Image (cartoon, grey):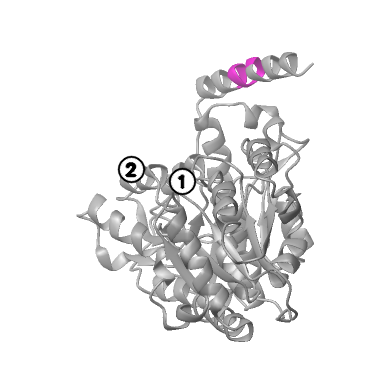
């Protein structure tokens, strides 16, 4: 039987955005709630070349003073540049240290999925599909015979997965949005211009960030006096900034770059509407955090965002428009702007508490785990042949030399 008081989170080493942030936050929350929590990852001896200044998950957990048990080992260039088989071997050795029957939630990393599912007969695997993308669907298709449960962050992902793995037990697929820590709420007051905010990558791919300049251009033609705060960076930043200047709107748009999490939360609390222009999403963390801060949302009809459109509370704080339809976006912004500020803030906060609190997320995972019927098999031996080890180290050495030469 499943040990319902134990849970493990299995992740690659670096904080790479919303998925990994949730892994750390959820592990800390489960541990604070009294569960025996294990966090499995590796510890780079020195910063990976691919890290690009990001903090590690272990650093993030340390900042949170997490009570989770860390299951880790130090690794170097031979891990970063080695073969997937070698990395999976290291991961499997870490996983094998856990008590049998411990449910394992895997991160958005193909090697982590491969390692966890290799020991599926001893540890039930919970695969999380964080976005409406083929990358996640392909992992689910590949490992459907090994996974005990699939958690989908949105209704669209859930419905798509049911079609893609029709022989899988549908009772073991559920919609479970990632949860967030909902902190104290201090609604902003005051008048002034309508304060819009965008927080995310400034890219065409997925985020369709170029629409921000188009929205500003059309909004400037209306009677609404506005100011847009843009948090984030990406390859479209310079283009968007230039378009804003050409349109004579430089005084109405502020580019903040990347900001620490607390500063983003403070800014969201001061703004009226979060803009989400995406072509695709999973369940946007920025949307959850904006609602928790009392900020309304106007976003595209894509995975995750569309799930909230018909919620009762959404009438006072939330609108969805057709992707790329700028006139529709302007219309929806006007609708939210017309709602009294206090009513909008209260509805947004209540929607976040109802749908996206970490407590709600934990309850959904506990319910999912309780449905898993599991009888463990003896732990298989975790092995890497001598030939595989030599091959991986040779590959790793060659790749590390190449990278050093390119950056010297």
Q: For the residue labelled by badge 1, is the local secondary structure a helix, a strand or a loop?
A: helix
Q: Position of residue 347 (x, y in %)?
A: 55, 83
Sequence-wise, the earlier of marks 1 and 2 is 1
Residue 397 on the magenta segment:
yes
Residue positioned most to the left: 167
The reply to whether discs 1 and 2 touch (Cβ–Cβ < 8 Å) is yes
Quadrant in the picture for the C terminus: top right
Of 96 and 256, nearer the camera is 256
Q: Quadrant of residue 87?
A: top right
Q: Position of residue 177 (x, y in %)?
A: 47, 66
Quadrant in the picture for the N terminus: bottom left
* Label ID, residue 142: 2
Horizontally, residue 151 falls left or right of residue 60, namely left
Q: Position of residue 365 (x, y in %)?
A: 46, 71
Read off the residue under disc 1: 113
Q: For the residue labelled by badge 2, is the local secondary structure a helix, a strand or a loop?
A: helix
Residue 210 visible, this orientation: yes
């Amino acid at each position: 039987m499943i040990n319902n008081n134990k849970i493990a989170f299995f992740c690659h080493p670096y904080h790479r955005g919303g998925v990994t942030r949730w892994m750390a936050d959820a592990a800390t929350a489960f541990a604070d709630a009294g569960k025996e929590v294990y966090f499995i990852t590796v510890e780079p001896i020195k910063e990976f070349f691919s890290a690009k200044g990001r903090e590690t998950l272990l650093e993030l957990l340390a900042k949170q003073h997490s009570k989770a048990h860390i299951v880790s080992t130090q690794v170097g260039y031979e891990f970063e540049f080695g073969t997937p088989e070698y990395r999976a071997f290291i991961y499997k050795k870490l996983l094998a240290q856990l008590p049998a029957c411990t449910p394992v939630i895997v991160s958005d990393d193909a090697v982590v999925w491969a390692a966890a599912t290799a020991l599926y007969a001893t540890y039930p695997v919970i695969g999380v599909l964080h976005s409406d993308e083929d990358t996640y669907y392909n992992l689910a298709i590949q490992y459907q015979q090994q996974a005990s449960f699939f958690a989908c962050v949105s209704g669209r992902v859930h419905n798509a997965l049911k079609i893609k793995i029709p022989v899988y037990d549908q009772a073991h697929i559920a919609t479970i949005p990632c949860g967030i820590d909902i902190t104290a709420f201090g609604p902003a007051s005051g008048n002034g211009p309508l304060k819009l905010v965008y927080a995310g990558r400034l890219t065409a791919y997925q985020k369709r960030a170029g629409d921000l300049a188009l929205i500003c251009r059309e909004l400037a033609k209306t009677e609404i006096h506005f100011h847009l705060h843009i948090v984030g960076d990406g390859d479209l930043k310079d283009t968007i900034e230039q378009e804003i200047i050409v349109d004579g709107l430089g005084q109405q748009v502020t580019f903040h770059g990347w900001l620490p999490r607390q500063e983003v939360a403070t800014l969201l609390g001061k703004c009226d509407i979060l803009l989400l222009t995406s072509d695709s999403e999973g369940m946007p963390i920025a949307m959850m955090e904006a609602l928790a801060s009392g900020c309304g949302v106007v976003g595209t009809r894509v995975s995750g965002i569309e799930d909230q459109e018909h919620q009762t509370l959404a009438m006072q704080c939330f609108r969805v428009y057709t992707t790329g339809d700028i006139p529709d976006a302007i219309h929806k912004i006007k609708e939210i702007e017309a709602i009294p500020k206090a009513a909008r803030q209260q509805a947004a906060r209540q929607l976040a508490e109802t749908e996206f609190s970490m407590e709600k997320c934990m309850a959904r995972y506990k319910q999912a785990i309780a449905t898993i019927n599991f009888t463990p098999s003896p732990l298989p031996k975790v092995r890497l042949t001598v030939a595989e080890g030599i091959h991986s180290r040779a590959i790793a050495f060659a790749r590390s030399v190449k990278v050093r030469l390119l950056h010297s």
